């Protein structure tokens, strides 16, 4: 297991370098002047000063070298549009908030989605099953921004139960502002988990070893929890990695609508503003998260399914 | 059996209840509305929450480029002059000013009671330091060009070596603590009004030098205006409180102005309607909601100094008759009422209503009838030798432009002209347009928001060398007349020259390089408790010292 982890960590390095290179090339390709935000053209002297300040007057490989050096020294550079802040500041402020949003959405998806799927599988084709799958279909079909706006309209404006926007500053603070965004973001993963768990449980319950366990006289609860559920969770765990990617990109939209000051919303703005250093910094961060998440999933896979462990 | 199922069900439900309970604990969002007493007059609690539409990219006057920064800065700092509702300069930190006979030297006499929040007095030296800092190439200030009217400014800003020597030559000096002398490259009659812009604010030298980039953080910042920066949680909240040490503090009624930064237009409106903010910042309302919001008593619309226009590439659409036809066919009233819906004003020239001298300057162009004139348009088109029948219309992807373009496409179809709409992302669009003007463009959409309230700001766009002229229009006569206007300090005489310029563009024999469509407005939402005193100037500024929360 240890060699496995070490090998995977080593692979992260070329992955990150490749991500930097692709992002760099793509951002240059889309063109646009990072210093011109209004229709007013930037006078030549000012354009020259700004390019000099942000190294944009150097050849592309020199700029690339600056970025790589920045990533390796954890100094992601100054922001081109927010002149008083560095990318490190922005990430330090925004990342915990996005992380919290993502985690809460994920938790809510797990806590509601998995039991929903389990219960639906235990009573297949019953009223409960139909209702559960109907809710799950809604979660699939409705885009998160639509749900978000509806939620704000009904629960904030009409009923006044929750604030329309905003986010608590400290990571450990919990208040009303967390509820609607986490719900909107977690709806799709919840639906995904529910369906996935239901499907794999139904399939697992047909297996011979389950029949054997029941025939042996084991208690129903032990059969379900230890034998059926544990094996049914493997597809759910596998799905977590791509779902995490979905949640991360989903935060962009949710953060924008709820005015949550996380890095997702920032990322969108930086692309429009052509703020190269911020785009680069956040892309690198996001890709490292996904790599770490995939590693975690693979480890969990090993924990849940001993057969994969032996193969190593 | 049943017990186990029940257990699982209950566990699942508990999970979601726990989440909801966690959400219900703790305080709610920030921001307090004003609570009034029963009588009319000022409320006891003079607190007003604003919904800002964007995070200010910087609160450094040298680096601030957008409206949110500018609005916050003009309330926490003390400018030399302010602009009143007629865009005339009124004394602020400068209690009076003199112009030399040739108009090239401006002397500001500063008040003696200006004070920084750390107790230091505000002196003319602060302004000298700050203006030179804004012009320094190291700072790479976007708005350095606002100071280009000063002697030696452009040279200093574009210097690559020997910069200190050039800095000493910049035409601003403090002859004593309360006298600021400015030397201009030419007589610029609008300079005093222009100095109300944030680029001309002073910063506290010791603070800037001590904290570098971080000097604008609330714990470091030193300001000299009617309000102080109490809290700035980036991207989330920016709170101002009254500065009791300010020279005019006794007339300022608001004690605190919390601000929530809400970027999405729909969410901003929802925040207003649920009572979380008392006023929005004039940054615009979502186009599809305007129709509904207009009928609410909280709706207010302000004139703005800005022109929305369609520019012609006169190399592609070379026949003046065709340009006239295209301009005549546009039904501006229909576009304003049905599409834009922001109570904008139909444009009859470049300089918008509200600009000083509008009545003299406005040409009331015969080519921009309010309801369009299809008959006259067809007539003009028939006089064109070989008009271009297939036109490419370019515009950017911000909300509203596509709908306007589609409406105009239909109006031009009636003339027999087929328009292909081409939409682009903003930054790419700007790069695509040029300069030099892109030959693939026949017609393009742009707007121009005025920097200062003088018509020259919009008219000089159409000179040959202007970086904002994508029309290929280049007329030496026009350029010479613009130069003449810049040398005319007498307002009345200068407005006559502006009128001439407008005639050259939009008059009976005007060249029509662009067709102006409407003059911008700021639609806004304000609670009735603040609506009377909360105002947005045509240059998109909010003066918080004037706001009083009604009881």
Image (cartoon, coloured by chain):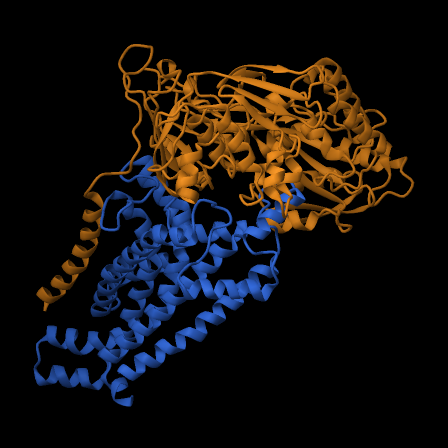
Chain colours: A blue, B orange
Outermost residue, right side: B385
Q: Work out whether B526 lies above or below B214.
A: above
Whole-percent x and y of residue B527?
39, 23
Is residue B330 left or right of B20 when viewed as pictured? right
Q: Work out whether B551 lies above or below A92.
A: above
Q: Which residue corresponds to the image point at 20% horizontal and 42% vertical from the top-left?
A: B26
Which quadrant of the figure contains the C terminus of chain A? bottom left
Q: Work out whether B6 lies above or below B118.
A: below
- Along the viewing direction, whichever of B160 and B313 lies nearer the viewer: B160
Which quadrant of the figure contains the N terminus of chain A? bottom left
Whole-percent x and y of residue A238?
32, 73
Q: Which residue corresponds to the image point at 33% horizontal and 10% vertical from the top-left?
A: B40
Is residue B256 left or right of B373 when viewed as pictured? left
Do we see residue A135 in this rendering? yes
Q: Which residue corresponds to the image point at 65% horizontal and 22% vertical from the top-left?
A: B190
> Within the image, what quadrant is residue A205 found in?
bottom left
> Within the image, what quadrant is residue A214 found in?
bottom left
How many numbered marks appear? 0
Whole-percent x and y of residue A208?
21, 86
- Along the viewing direction, whichever of B161 and A159 lies nearer the viewer: B161
Q: Which residue corresponds to the image point at 56% horizontal and 35% vertical from the top-left?
A: B132
Is residue B498 left or right of B355 when viewed as pictured? right
Q: Work out whether B435 lies above or below B129.
A: below
- Along the viewing direction, whichever of B153 and B200 lies nearer the viewer: B153
Whole-percent x and y of residue B474?
82, 37
> Within the image, what quadrant is residue A218 found in?
bottom left
Do we see residue B426 in this rendering? no
């Amino acid at each position: 297991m240890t060699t496995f982890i070490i090998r995977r960590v080593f692979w992260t390095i070329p992955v990150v370098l490749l991500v930097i290179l692709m992002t760099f090339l793509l951002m240059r390709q889309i063109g646009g002047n990072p210093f011109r935000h209004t229709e007013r053209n930037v006078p030549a002297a000012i354009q020259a000063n700004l390019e000099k300040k942000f190294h944009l007057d150097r050849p592309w490989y020199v700029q690339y070298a600056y970025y790589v050096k920045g990533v390796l020294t954890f100094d992601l550079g100054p922001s081109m549009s927010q002149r008083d802040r560095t990318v490190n500041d922005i990430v330090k402020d925004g990342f915990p908030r996005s992380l919290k949003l993502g985690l809460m959405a994920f938790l809510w998806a797990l806590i509601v989605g998995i039991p929903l799927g389990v219960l639906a599988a235990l009573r297949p084709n019953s009223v409960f099953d139909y209702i559960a799958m109907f809710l799950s279909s809604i979660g699939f079909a409705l885009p998160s921004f639509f749900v978000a706006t509806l939620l704000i309209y009904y629960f904030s404006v009409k009923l006044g139960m929750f604030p329309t926007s905003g986010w608590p500053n400290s990571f450990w603070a919990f208040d009303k502002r967390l509820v609607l965004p986490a719900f909107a973001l977690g709806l799709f993963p919840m639906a995904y988990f529910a369906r996935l768990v239901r499907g794999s449980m139904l399939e697992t319950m047909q297996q011979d070893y389950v029949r054997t366990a029941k025939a042996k006289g084991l208690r129903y609860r032990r059969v379900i929890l230890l034998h059926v559920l544990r094996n049914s969770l493997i597809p759910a765990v596998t799905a977590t990695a791509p779902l995490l990617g979905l949640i991360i990109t989903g935060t962009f939209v949710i953060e924008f609508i709820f005015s949550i000051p996380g890095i997702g919303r920032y990322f969108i703005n930086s692309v429009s503003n052509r703020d190269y250093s911020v785009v680069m910094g956040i892309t690198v961060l996001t890709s490292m998260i996904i790599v770490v998440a995939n590693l975690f999933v693979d480890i969990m896979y090993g924990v849940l399914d001993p057969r994969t462990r032996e193969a190593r | 059996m049943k017990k186990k199922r029940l257990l699982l069900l209950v566990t699942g439900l508990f999970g979601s209840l726990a989440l909801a309970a966690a959400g219900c604990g703790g305080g709610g969002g920030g921001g307090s509305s004003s609570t009034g007493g029963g009588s009319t007059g000022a409320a006891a609690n003079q607190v007003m929450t604003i919904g800002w539409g964007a995070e200010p990219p910087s609160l450094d006057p040298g680096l601030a480029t957008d409206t949110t920064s500018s609005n916050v800065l003009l309330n926490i700092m003390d400018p030399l002059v302010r602009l009143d509702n007629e865009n005339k300069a009124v004394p602020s930190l400068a209690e009076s000013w003199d112009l030399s006979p040739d108009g090239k030297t401006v002397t500001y006499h500063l008040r003696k009671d200006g004070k920084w929040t750390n107790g230091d007095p505000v002196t003319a030296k602060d302004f000298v330091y700050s203006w030179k800092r804004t012009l320094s190439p190291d700072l790479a200030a976007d708005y350095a060009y606002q100071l280009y009217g000063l002697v030696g400014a452009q040279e200093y800003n574009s210097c690559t070596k020997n910069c200190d020597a050039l800095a000493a030559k910049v035409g601003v000096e403090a002859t004593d603590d309360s006298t600021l002398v400015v030397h201009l490259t030419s007589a610029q009659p609008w300079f005093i009004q222009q100095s109300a812009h944030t680029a001309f604010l002073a910063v506290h030298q010791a603070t800037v030098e001590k904290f570098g980039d971080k000097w604008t953080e609330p714990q470091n910042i030193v300001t000299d205006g009617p309000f102080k920066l109490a809290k700035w949680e980036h991207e989330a909240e920016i709170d101002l409180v009254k500065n009791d040490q300010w020279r005019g503090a006794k007339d300022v009624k608001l004690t605190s102005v919390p601000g929530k930064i809400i970027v999405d237009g729909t969410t901003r409106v929802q925040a207003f309607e649920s009572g979380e903010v008392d006023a929005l910042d004039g940054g615009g309302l979502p186009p599809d909601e305007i129709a509904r919001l207009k009928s609410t008593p909280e709706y207010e619309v302000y004139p703005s100094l800005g022109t929305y226009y369609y520019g012609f590439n006169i190399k592609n659409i070379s026949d003046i008759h065709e340009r006239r036809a295209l301009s005549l066919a546009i039904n501006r009233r229909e576009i304003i009422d049905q599409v834009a819906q922001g109570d904008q004003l139909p444009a009859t020239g470049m300089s918008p209503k509200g600009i000083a001298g509008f009545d003299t300057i406005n040409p009331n162009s015969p080519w921009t009838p309010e309801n369009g004139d299809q008959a006259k348009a067809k007539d003009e088109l028939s006089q064109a030798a070989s008009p271009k029948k297939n036109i490419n219309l370019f515009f950017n992807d911000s909300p509203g432009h596509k709908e306007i373009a589609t409406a105009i496409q239909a109006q031009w179809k009636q003339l027999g002209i087929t328009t292909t709409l081409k939409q682009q992302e903003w930054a790419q669009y700007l790069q695509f347009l040029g300069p030099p003007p892109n030959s693939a463009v026949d017609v393009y959409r742009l707007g121009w928001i005025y920097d200062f309230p003088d018509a020259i700001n919009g008219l000089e766009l159409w000179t040959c060398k202007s970086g904002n002229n994508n029309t290929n229009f280049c007329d030496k006569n026009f350029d010479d007349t613009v130069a003449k206007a810049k040398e005319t300090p007498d307002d009345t005489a200068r407005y006559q020259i502006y009128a001439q310029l407008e005639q050259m563009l939009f008059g009976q024999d005007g060249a029509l390089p662009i067709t102006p469509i409407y003059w911008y407005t700021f639609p806004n939402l304000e609670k009735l408790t603040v609506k009377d005193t909360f105002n947005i100037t045509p240059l998109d500024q909010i003066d918080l010292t004037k706001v009083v929360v009604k009881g």
